[in-house]
Image (cartoon, rainbow, N blue to C red):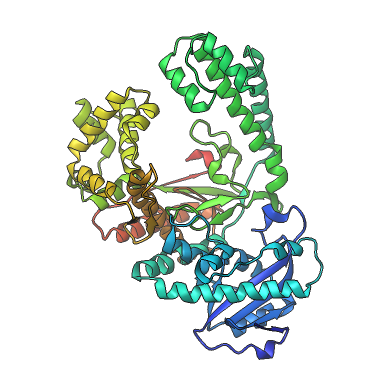
Amino acid sequence: MKITVDDLSALEPKPNQFVAIDLEIFTNKGDDKHLHRPTTGRFACLSVCYDPDEVFIFTSELIVPSILEKLQDCVWVIQNSKFDLTHLRRWADVPPRKKLFDTMLIERILFNGLYDSFSLKAMARRRLGIALSKEEREAFEGAAELTPEMVEYAALDASVTLQIAKQQKKEMDKNDIYVWTEIDRPALWAFLDFQGFAIDVDKWNSLAERNKTRQLELDAQIPFNPRSPKQVVSWLSKHGFAKIENSQEKTLQKLINKFPNTDASKASQDVLDSRMYSKRASTYGAKFIEEYLEHDGGVPVIHTDYDVSRAETGRTACSNPPMQQIPVRDTHEFRECFVARPGHKLVVADYSAQEPRLSAYVSHDSKLIQWFNEDKDVYIELGKCIFGKTLTKKDPERQTMKSTVLGLTYGMSEYGLSEREGISKEEAAELIANVLAILPDMATYMEKQRRNKKMVATPFGRKQWLNPYSDQVERNALNSPIQGGAADMMKKALASIHQHWSFDCPFGVVGYIHDELVLDVPEELADDVAEFVKEQMEVVATDMVRGKIPFKADVSIGNTWAEK
């Protein structure tokens, strides 16, 4: 392989030619949690390759704008482009472009569920029979200048990326192309423009201290060491849980439900609460601030690293920090710490009954479609049929209906429903049977989906390969089209909001948490932004289902993330 170093005049690609681009940066020890930020690392080199046998290496960030200008009419091929584009924007203006081909994201589109890894090393082995060594990558840590070995490493990465892309291009069908060009690629550009999420540091640290105090108070009243599995099992077995096998959360919760009025039950709940507060104090405490806090114009903010399609279903995930794991179901204390910037408001939006609406669309269930078209609450309507009375949104029976319907869309069994609702397996089985009797088209669809043992797809064409030997195969066959379809819809809505953003302020999205968008915008624009976001989300969703079912977005305006 020929390697040409720092000769910009030799770079002569043709228009629309696939050109691999690979950025290498020098890092310091401990940078790994911050590499998604353009504030971390130093330019090492940029590799450019449009012929697998020749690679151009450039060692100065000063000519990055000139390099990219020469490649303007080419298709940029990048492995994990979000990383490279984030840092390239430090040295050049890189606006959203359609001529982008991300080998990692496209490999996921092609083979989600079939492979565990979509790294360049894994793809090179699978596709090209090349064993890439990543040991040389470690040499970039703490280095100040390139060695010949580093240059060869960077050049090989670019050549391999180009070869993989050419194979992928031949394998993509029209659905794969749609998912890339209409969902994942546009969403990628939106994620690149996210702002930092403002945080009240004092309130966060105070919450961490309270959680630690709560844990210590509980520990003091528990008659054994709650951190010792052996002591937990021993004490509980003598005070009401005779056949306890271990001290895992699932086991304790099951026994609490089975033997509620025992000393063991109370002690077990204290153990679970102690563990919860301990985790909150450690995982979401002072260390969280120390590791992830940044400042934007004097405002303390958190920037998380979004991965467009990390989950097998195609759902977006995030890390460093994992914002999607911040507790919310049983407390809003943490969300209260995430706030609007001074003079701003938070706009929080999500879809109303998104999964049931998608279930209605894919199953063609006439009853569900009727209820949604009549703008009725499906959980209340089901409650009328099953419980024989009119429910309100506050009635526990409505929550039971919601758990049952959502559980069905995710392949939940009567065992899972019984644990979630605290009812017997027989009651859960009867509940599921009654719901499916009212929704026969849904029942037919579910039975058909369960027979899939190889591959399923979202309503919008995203594939997920199934493991026929897994005991979760039927559940995945049911779950993936709905969960993945919901993710497709959210990403397409996000992309549309990004593409049509015309307000006199930066693109306002600061959070994308599962099925929820959070925007931070000037207070005087909040009402207009809320109306705009609602319209974009509803138009995108209804268009994706060809107008067969209306989709609704719920939007609120507040000062903290908890006010939704």
Q: Nearer the viewer, residue 334 or 555?
A: 334
* Residue that extends furthest to the right in the rendered view of this protein: 144
Position of residue 263 in the picture relative to residue 430 (left or right) = right
The residue lying toward the viewer, choosing from 238 and 306, is 238
| Residue at image coords 50%, 69% | 127
Residue that appears at 67% across and 23% down: 213
- Please tell me whether residue 256 is drawn above or below residue 335 in the rendered image: above
The quadrant of the image that shows the N terminus is bottom right
| Residue 506 makes an appearance in the image | no
Q: Nearer the viewer, residue 536 or 367?
A: 367
> In the drawing, does residue 518 fall left or right of residue 536?
right
**Residue at 25% across, 41% down:** 376
Q: Position of residue 260 (x, y in %)?
A: 44, 13
Can residue 333 be seen at all in this image of the molecule?
yes
Between 305 and 478, the one lying in front of the other is: 478
Query: What is the quadrant of residue 168 in the picture?
Result: bottom left
Counting the numbered discs, the total is 0
Q: Residue 401, image x and y in percent? A: 30, 33
Image coords of residue 59 (percent x, y): 74, 77
Is 19 left, or right, of 145 in this rendering? Answer: left
Above or below residue 419? Residue 35 is: below
What x and y, as percent, mark residue 56? 66, 82
User: In the displayed structure, would residue 400 be above or below residue 529?
Assistant: above
